[in-house]
């Protein structure tokens, strides 16, 4: 007889796959005993039972690499207990069958160094010694990670579930969730076909059912079940296999992977012609309610390319039969990253969208989710995996989501060059000036669904093209746009910036509480500041404009609006503040007018005085430009005199045309985001999600000036942790590096060495056209002063460099404050 459900549980975990079992286990391990895990059928009956079980650790994202390393540590530990999950530390090989792929694995070797993973670069013959079934023909090199391995997914799930149960958790199988109740935006109860359970926290670990579960609270989790196939071969001929486990093998140029399965192989891949299972362009996923412990029919036609390629690399497969074909649906996201964290509904968490690498991540996922639930903070910078990144409304579109998922699945093994652009679902969000950009040769990029100008297509010199990966999506047009801003005036369309309005009777007190800077200034004040978490880390990096006594405008990065709005809403709930928080991004167009002649362009168009006395830096004025009413903010992200001009979107096209026409006599040149990036690198301006984030404090990032310091300045979120960290002494600081070879350009993620020791990684990098230097930023030990020699590994080659001054261009900010 089934165990009776408790009437209450503090935490309800929905989904009995490896993700849900790991979350329950880690909650219990942290001391939370009031945990209920609900499974609609039997444990492992979702994607877990048909997973291939590969566990690779290295990823481009350091946080995910750390999480996968935690998984390996857990699986090793469990293997020594009565709950052994079948962990085999066989190692893994990744082959390079093209020159471009060889470049990639050399960069990956750098990622491994920064993470402390023992990755080795091998020749083709050395790889064949480890995997003697492979043909080395066409292989140019390989990467070998000896601590990777494989695990039995079902045994792992049962082991975690058993340990969770032993620690006090309740596990109820054959229990389907039919509803989730909320009160005032917070979960309060889960309703099942076996009774109701009051709760404080719900964790959606539903795998391919995760989106359906989330819809019960009107939350969008954009996962699409995709048909993913692999075969289990018949036994290989006697004597074919060595007497030790084969490492897993990936040949991404051939789209295939392999691992040993007793005396045969598992072989699969990612085909160019994908097959969504239940979602369509006009309907969300509709997984049959009885699809538990089932597989899809084999699709041999779609698998033909993978099968053919597999025999190129492992010729013995041409004469080896197939014991079974596994065609199981796997939940994929639009960017091939997990969906983790708390949603806009308080207490409703998600741990789903594992994109066929959930077994590798499961141990780490459970650990960060337990921290998120119990501490309110995952302990790592997980923005790339945070479910809130899909908070933009267009992800509610089945068509947009499906197009993005298909594009990512079909390019799963493609080399992901920095600055490469996706094409699916475009164009979608456009500025009022978009037709002008398109008509004048704009080359567009996309971010958060917005079409943004990367650069225009005017010809330029190829002389400065960087070597290696940095040169692949480089354009000579950027230098022209960069120098126009420094020498005359540039115009940039920043309409995509996320904008959040904070209003209401408690708005001023709320802003003072959540922001570390001094926001309680008179209307018209603009404050650059951060919002901190309880660790003193930077959760938001924004400008806050006081529009009126009870109204503030927060401007943040294009992709960060849902994150920042979600964080503010949680703070409002926690404090009971009477504030209205609204995403007003689409209501305002925004254009940046910057350069030494910016005042000359704007002055004839507006009745407002633009002098330093009347319009100081930084501040805001309500005025007009031509016929357009607007808010003019005297701020900059390029290090020059200028303004951000905000107008209601219906005036946007008129304002752009007005500025272009007025600027022509002054040498105005429209520019794009690639020029902004080069300009801000020279000025040392930080970017959230790269240079700064939840793991970095303002003191470490060189942003102490943006934080209230005095004892009488009042409390703000994170102040205690910041002061405690300051008392202990800051041990690392974000430093500007310049490389000796200006054509060797770091892009982010490259290891940084002082002497023979790898001490850090590049947070962001690029080329500064005014200072004519290759620039990179990295957190270095606090004792690394200006002039310290360093080396940065760019595309597998160590390039010498030096710790430079914090600001390379106009360090005193005289050009920003220039009067006229």
Image (cartoon, rainbow, N blue to C red):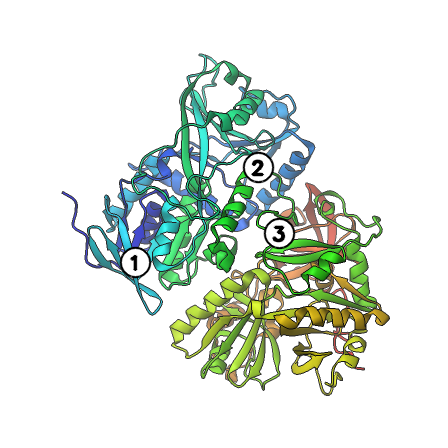
- Left or right of 432, for residue 214: left
Which numbered disc covers residue 180?
1
Answer with mark 1 or mark 2, whichever residue precedes in sequence.
1
Q: Secondary structure at mark 1?
A: strand
Tell me if residue 166 comes above or below residue 664 in the rendering.
above
Classify the position of the N terminus by image quarter.
Answer: top left
In the image, residue 610 above or below residue 647: below
Q: Is residue 536 left or right of residue 467?
A: left
The image shows residue 769 at horizontal and vertical percentages of 79, 58
- In the picture of the structure, the residue carrying the numbered disc 3 is 761
- Give the crowd class for mark 2: few <14, some 14-19, many >=20 residues within 10 Å: some
Tag 2 residue: 413
Under circle 2, the secondary element is loop
Q: Can residue 336 be seen at all in this image of the molecule? A: no
| Distance from the alpha carbon under mark 3 to that under mark 2 | 24 Å
Q: Residues within 10 Å of mark 1 (few under 14, many from 20)?
A: many
Quadrant in which the C terminus is drawn: bottom right
């Amino acid at each position: 007889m089934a165990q009776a459900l408790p009437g209450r549980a503090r935490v309800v975990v929905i989904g009995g796959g490896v993700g849900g079992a790991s979350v329950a286990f880690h909650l219990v391990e942290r001391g939370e005993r009031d945990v209920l895990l609900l499974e609609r059928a039997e444990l492992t009956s979702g994607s877990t039972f048909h997973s291939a079980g590969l566990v690779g650790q290295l990823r481009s994202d350091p946080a995910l690499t750390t999480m996968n390393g935690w998984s390996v540590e857990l699986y090793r530990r469990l293997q020594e207990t009565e709950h052994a999950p079948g962990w085999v530390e066989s190692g893994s090989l990744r082959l390079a069958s093209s020159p471009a792929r060889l470049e990639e694995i050399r960069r990956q070797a750098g990622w491994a160094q920064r993470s402390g993973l023992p990755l080795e670069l091998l020749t083709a013959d050395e790889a064949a010694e480890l995997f003697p079934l492979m043909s080395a023909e066409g292989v140019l090199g390989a990467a070998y990670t000896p601590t990777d391995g494989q695990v039995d997914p079902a045994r792992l799930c049962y082991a975690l579930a058993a340990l969770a149960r032993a620690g006090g958790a309740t596990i109820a199988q054959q229990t389907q969730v039919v509803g989730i109740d909320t009160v005032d935006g917070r979960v309060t109860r889960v309703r099942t076909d076996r009774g109701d359970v009051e709760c404080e926290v719900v964790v959606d670990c539903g795998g391919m059912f995760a989106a359906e579960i989330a819809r019960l609270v009107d939350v969008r989790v954009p996962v699409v079940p995709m048909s993913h196939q692999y075969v289990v071969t018949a036994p290989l001929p006697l004597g074919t296999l060595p007497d030790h486990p084969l490492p897993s093998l990936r040949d991404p140029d051939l789209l295939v992977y392999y691992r040993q399965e007793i005396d045969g192989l598992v072989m699969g891949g990612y085909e160019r012609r994908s097959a969504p299972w239940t979602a369509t362009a006009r309907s969300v996923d509709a997984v049959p309610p009885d699809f538990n412990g089932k597989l899809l029919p084999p699709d041999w036609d779609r698998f033909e390319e993978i099968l053919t390629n597999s025999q190129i690399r492992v010729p013995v497969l041409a004469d080896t039969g197939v014991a079974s074909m596994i065609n199981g649906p796997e939940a994929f996201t639009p960017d091939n990253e997990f969906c983790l964290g708390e949603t806009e509904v308080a207490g409703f968490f998600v741990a789903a969208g594992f994109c066929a690498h959930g077994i590798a991540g499961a141990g780490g996922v459970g650990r960060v989710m337990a921290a998120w639930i119990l501490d309110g903070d995952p302990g790592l910078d997980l923005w790339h995996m945070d479910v809130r990144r899909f908070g933009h409304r267009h992800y509610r579109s089945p068509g947009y989501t499906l197009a993005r998922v298909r594009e990512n699945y079909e390019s799963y093994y493609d080399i992901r060059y920095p600055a490469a652009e996706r094409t699916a679902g475009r164009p979608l969000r456009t500025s009022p000036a978009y037709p002008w950009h398109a008509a004048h040769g704009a080359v567009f990029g996309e971010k958060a669904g917005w079409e943004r100008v990367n650069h225009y297509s005017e010809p330029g010199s190829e002389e400065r093209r960087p070597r290696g990966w940095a040169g692949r999506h480089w354009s000579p047009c950027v230098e022209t746009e960069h120098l126009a801003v420094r020498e005359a005036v540039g115009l940039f369309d920043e309409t995509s910036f996320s904008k959040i309005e904070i209003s209401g009777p408690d708005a001023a007190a709320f802003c003072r509480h959540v922001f570390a800077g001094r926001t309680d200034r008179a209307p018209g004040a603009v404050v650059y500041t951060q919002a901190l978490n309880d660790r003193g880390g930077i959760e938001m990096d924004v400008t806050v404009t006081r529009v009126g006594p009870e109204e503030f405008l927060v401007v943040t990065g294009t992709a960060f609006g849902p994150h920042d709005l979600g964080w503010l809403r949680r703070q409002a709930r926690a404090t009971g503040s009477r504030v209205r928080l609204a995403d007003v991004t689409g209501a305002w167009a925004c254009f940046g007018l910057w350069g030494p002649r910016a005042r000359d362009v704007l002055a004839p168009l507006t009745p407002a005085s633009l002098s330093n006395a009347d319009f100081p830096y930084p501040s805001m004025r309500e005025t007009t430009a031509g016929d357009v009413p607007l808010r003019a903010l005297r701020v900059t992200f390029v290090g020059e005199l200028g303004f951000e001009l905000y107008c209601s979107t219906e005036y946007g096209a008129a304002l752009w045309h007005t500025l272009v026409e007025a600027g022509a006599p002054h040498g105005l040149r429209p520019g794009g985001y690639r020029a902004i990036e080069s300009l801000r690198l020279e000025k040392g301006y930080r970017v959230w999600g790269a240079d700064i984030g939840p793991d970095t404090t303002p003191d470490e990032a060189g942003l102490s000036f943006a934080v209230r310091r005095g004892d009488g300045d009042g409390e703000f979120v994170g102040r205690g942790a910041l002061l405690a960290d300051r008392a202990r002494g800051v041990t690392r600081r974000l430093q500007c590096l310049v490389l000796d070879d200006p054509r060797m350009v770091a892009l982010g993620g490259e290891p940084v060495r002082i002497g023979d020791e790898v001490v850090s990684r590049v947070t962001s990098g690029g080329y500064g056209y005014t200072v004519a230097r290759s620039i990179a930023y990295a957190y270095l030990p606090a004792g690394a002063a200006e002039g310290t020699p360093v080396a940065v590994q760019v595309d597998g080659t160590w390039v010498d460099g030096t710790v430079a001054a914090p600001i390379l261009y106009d360090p005193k900010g005289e050009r920003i404050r220039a009067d006229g």
